[in-house]
Image (spheres, grey):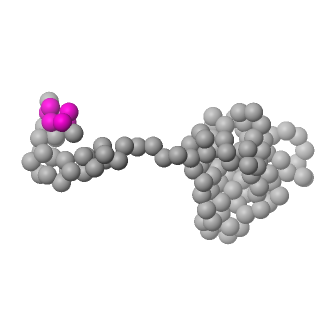
Amino acid sequence: MTELLSTLYATTPGTSLHLDGDAVRLAHPQRRGRHLIPLVRIDHIVAWNGVDLTDDLLHRCAADGRSVTWLTRNGRFLGRVSGPQTGNPMLRLAQFRGYEDPERRLALGKPGSTVARAI
């Protein structure tokens, strides 16, 4: 297992990842001991083919907005699970409409502009 930034890469076939309280427990038949990584340190999990994740861990990741990606043994994309997406589509549409209008775009870019409040 390698942890780069906030992504957990599980590359060893036969490894299983379990939810253990607020941590991920790594288990492999040839490696004894209890290996835990706190969930607060992980934003994303990448699992190569041959690595198993428990349903409890997948549900927790989805609930927390933590994504899980599966890759083949050769590193090709298989699939991804992520939790609910947030955002306001009406706000994005208003921002795009403001960008489309050159006069409004110029007004928004001026210091002290009050036009931004109208969006």
Give coordinates of residue 43: x percent, y percent: 59, 43
Main secondary-structure element of the magenta-colored stretch = helix
The residue sitting at the front extreme is 90
Q: Is residue 15 visible?
A: yes
Residue 116 located within the stretch drawn in magenta = yes
Does residue 92 sit above or below 75 in this rendering?
above
Nearest the camera: 80 or 49?
A: 80
Give coordinates of residue 67: x percent, y percent: 59, 49
The image quarter in which residue 40 lies? top right
x 72%, y 53%: residue: 10
Horizontally, residue 119 falls left or right of residue 15, namely left
Q: What span is colored magenta in the figure?
A: 113-118
Q: Is residue 3 visible?
A: no
Give coordinates of residue 105: x percent, y percent: 15, 46
x 68%, y 67%: residue: 72
The image quarter in which residue 76 lies? bottom right
x 88%, y 48%: residue: 31
x 73%, y 44%: residue: 56
The image quarter in which residue 12 lies? bottom right
Give coordinates of residue 64: x percent, y percent: 59, 39
Q: Quadrant of the C terminus?
A: top left
How many badges with numbers are in the image? 0
Horizontally, residue 96 falls left or right of residue 48, namely left
